[in-house]
Image (spheres, rainbow, N blue to C red):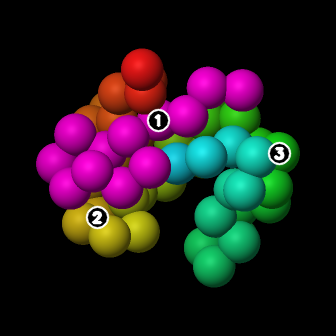
């Protein structure tokens, strides 16, 4: 699964790790995140994330 990076602050979402602190289980693909998911660091929405190289 592809990693995604917040274009505002650089936080990386790694699907293998998920975001357990915010209720996202490991193995959750970025595409499967809830529509209201926000960056846990800076608070921007999914539309501000880009696929990591």
Of residues 44 and 4, which is closer to you in this image?
A: 4
Closer to us: mark 2 or mark 3?
A: 3
Q: Earlier in the sequence, mark 1 or mark 2?
A: 1
Disc 3 is placed on an element classified as loop
Separation of marks 3 and 1 at Cα, in angstroms: 14 Å
Q: Residue at 38% of width from left, 40% of height from top? A: 5
Examine the residues drawn in magenta and state their main secondary structure: loop
Residue toward you, 11 or 21:
11
Indicate the position of residue 27 as horizontal and vertical percent values: 82, 45
**Mark 3, residue position:** 27
The image position of residue 22, as x and y in percent, is 61, 73
Foreground disc of the pair 1, 2: 1
Q: Which numbered dot is residue 43?
A: 2
Crowding around mark 3 (Cα neighbors within 10 Å: few <14, some 14 to 19, many 20+) is some
48 vs 12, left or right, is: left
Q: Residues within 10 Å of mark 1 (few under 14, many from 20)?
A: many
Asked whether residue 36 is in view, the answer is no
Residue 2 appears in view? yes
Say whether residue 52 is left or right of residue 30.
left
Task: Write the start and end of the magenta stretch as one range.
Answer: 1-12
Q: Residue at the spot x=69%, y=56% of the render?
A: 18
Separation (CA) of disc 2 from disc 3: 22 Å
Residue at image x 36%, y 55%?
11
Q: Residues within 10 Å of mark 2 (few under 14, many from 20)?
A: few
> What's the mark number on residue 34?
none
Name the residue tied to disc 1: 4
x and y percent of residue 19 in the render? 64, 64
Quadrant, the C terminus:
top left
């Amino acid at each position: 699964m592809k990693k995604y990076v917040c274009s505002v602050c650089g936080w990386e979402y790694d699907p293998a790790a998920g975001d357990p602190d915010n209720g996202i289980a490991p193995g959750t693909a970025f595409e499967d995140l809830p529509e209201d998911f926000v960056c846990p660091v800076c608070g921007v929405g999914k539309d501000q994330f880009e696929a990591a190289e």
